[in-house]
Image (cartoon, grey):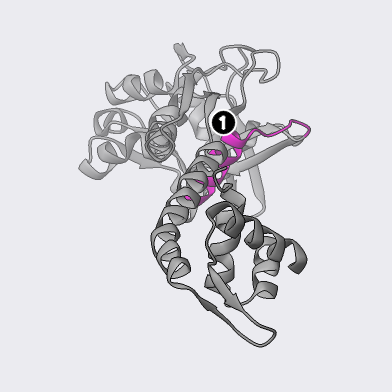
Amino acid sequence: MKPSLAELQTFVSIVRTGSFRAASVELEVSPPAVSLSLKQLEDRLGLKLINRSTRSMSLTEAGARLYEDLSPALSNIDHAVNNLAELRDRPAGTLRIAASRLAARLYMASLVHGFVRRYPEMKVELWADDNLTDLSEDNFDAGVRLGAIVDDRMVAIPVGPKARFVVVATPAYWHDHPVPSHPRDLLAHECVEFRFPTSRRPYQWMFRRGDEDISIEVNGSTIVNDMEVAAELVRNGLGVGYLLYDQVAEEIESGRLVMALESWLPPRAGHYLYYPSNRLVSRGFQAFKDFVREAAVE
C-alpha cells in the first residue's frame, strides 16, 4: 500500500523541526500520533528512515534521500493549496452603484476603473442618474451624492474632496449686468436653475459668510435637471450658474468664466458613497469600500 500524504507530511515535519515533539506542535497532533505515523510510513516502505534514541535522532540514507526529494514536492502542494485559498477569499461578483451624473464623471469612473483592474473577478454596474434613487427598492448596493442630500441614517464615505460651489457667468454677461455684491442681488439676474429630476423641487443656492447663512431660490427663464447641461448653458452666456468648481475649473482658469460672491462660498461637504447602515456587506462591497477609502487618502 502506498504511503498517505499525511504520513509523508509528518516525516518532513519531523526532519524540518528536528524533533517529534516540535513536529507534533507544528502539525497540531500528539507526539504519540507523530511516532505512529512515522512507523506506519516505514512499514509501508519497508525501510528505516530515522534512527532515533531517547536523546537524538538522525536520518538514514533512505530517509535523507526521501527528504531531499519530498520536501520541495510538499512545498509545491502547500503553495497550490494556498493559491486556491486566495482565490476563494478574493472578491468576486457584481456591485450596483447609483451616482449622480456629475459624481460619475468627476470621481466614480476613475474609481471603478482602478477597482476592476485590481479585482478582475468583480463586475461593477455604474448607473449615472440625477434621480434620488431608493437603493433597496432599485436593488443598488450603494449610491453617490453630495453630502448635503445624503440621509443621516446612511453610512457615508467620502469619494472626493470637499465641494466648492461657485457663482459664475461669462465676461460678456458681467459686462452687461452688475456683478452681485450680496447673494440677494442674484434675484435681479438671469440665473440657470437646476431642479431634482424626481421631486422637481429647485436646488437652492446656499451661501455663508461668518455667522450668516442664506439660501436663495433664484429666477431664470431656463430650468434644467442636469448639472452638466446647466454648466453648458452658462458657458454659452445664457446667464449665471451655481456650479461645482470642478465642473468649470478650466473655464475659470482661462478667463472664459468669471466668479462672483467668492467670499460667500466656503467649501462644503463633498460627494459621498452611501449605503443603509442595516445592510449586510458582501466581500465585494467591503473591498470596494476599502478601495474608496484608500483612494481618498492618496
Say left or right for 4 vs 152: left
Say left or right for 85 vs 103: right
Where 268 falls versus 136 (above or below)?
below
Q: Residue at 54% x, 49% y: name it.
A: 293
Quarter of the picture containing the N terminus is top right
Q: For residue 138, what is the image quadrant?
A: top right
Where 45 falls versus 51 (above or below)?
above
Q: Position of residue 235 (x, y in %)?
A: 29, 25
Q: Secondary structure at mark 1?
A: strand
Instruction: Confirm whether residue 30 shows in the render.
Output: no
Q: Nearer the viewer, residue 164 or 213?
A: 164
Q: For residue 231, what is the image quadrant?
A: top left
The range drawn in magenta is: 278-295
Q: Residue at 36% x, 41% y: name it.
A: 259
Principal SS element in the magenta part? helix
Q: Position of residue 284 (x, y in %)?
A: 57, 34
Say left or right for 141 vs 238: right
Residue that sits furthest to the left in the current view: 254
Q: Residue at 43% x, 71% y: name it.
A: 61
Quarter of the picture containing the C terminus is bottom left
The amino acid type of the residue labelled 1 equals Arg
Q: Position of residue 74 (x, y in %)?
A: 47, 54
Where 62 falls versus 55 (above or below)?
above
Check residue 153 for magenta coloring. no
The residue pinned by badge 1 equals: 145
Q: Nearer the viewer, residue 119 or 111?
A: 119
Where 282 falls versus 164 (above or below)?
above
Q: Residue at 23% x, 35% y: name it.
A: 256
Residue that sits furthest to the bottom in the current view: 55
